[in-house]
Amino acid sequence: MSKKEPAAPKAGSIATLPKMRRGLKGFYQDLIVEMRKVSWPTPKDSTRMSGMVLGVCGLVVLILFGISTGFEILWSIVMGGNG
């Protein structure tokens, strides 16, 4: 006897997932299985990527500061103020 293939869903029906483990224990078992599939970065990669994030944040801060200062100067000129 061979295993029967699951029947294909009918046209227009909603696809459903197969029954999974239920409850807290099933959740943690599935969590462990999925976490083992994760491709974790090496410490060197983590340091490099963190440096890139900090560098981009610093660049954005400088750009926004420049734009803000430019608008402040422009506003001062338009309003005819001294400072």
Image: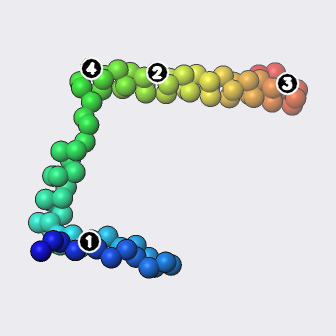
Earlier residue among tags 3 and 2: 2
Q: How much space separates mark 3 and mark 1, taking CA atoms? A: 77 Å
Identity, as a three-letter code, of the amino acid under mark 4: Lys
Q: How much space separates mark 2 and mark 1, taking CA atoms? A: 54 Å
Mark 2 or 1, closer to the camera: 1
On the image, the x and y values in percent for residue 1 come to 12, 74
Q: How many marks?
A: 4
- 74, above or below 24, in the image: above
Q: How much space separates mark 1 and mark 4, taking CA atoms? A: 47 Å
Q: At numbered mark 4, what does the secondary structure look like: helix, strand or loop?
A: helix
Question: 78 or 16: nearer the eye?
Answer: 16
Q: Which residue is denoted by mark 2 in the rendering?
A: 55
Which residue extends farthest front? 1
Are dots 3 and 2 in contact, CB under 8 Å? no
Q: Which residue is denoted by mark 3 in the rendering?
A: 77
Mark 4 or 2, closer to the camera: 4
Q: Mark 3: few, some, or many residues within 10 Å (few <14, many ≥20)?
A: few
Q: Which residue is denoted by mark 1 in the rendering?
A: 5
Identity, as a three-letter code, of the amino acid under mark 3: Ile
Q: Which residue is denoted by mark 4 in the rendering?
A: 44
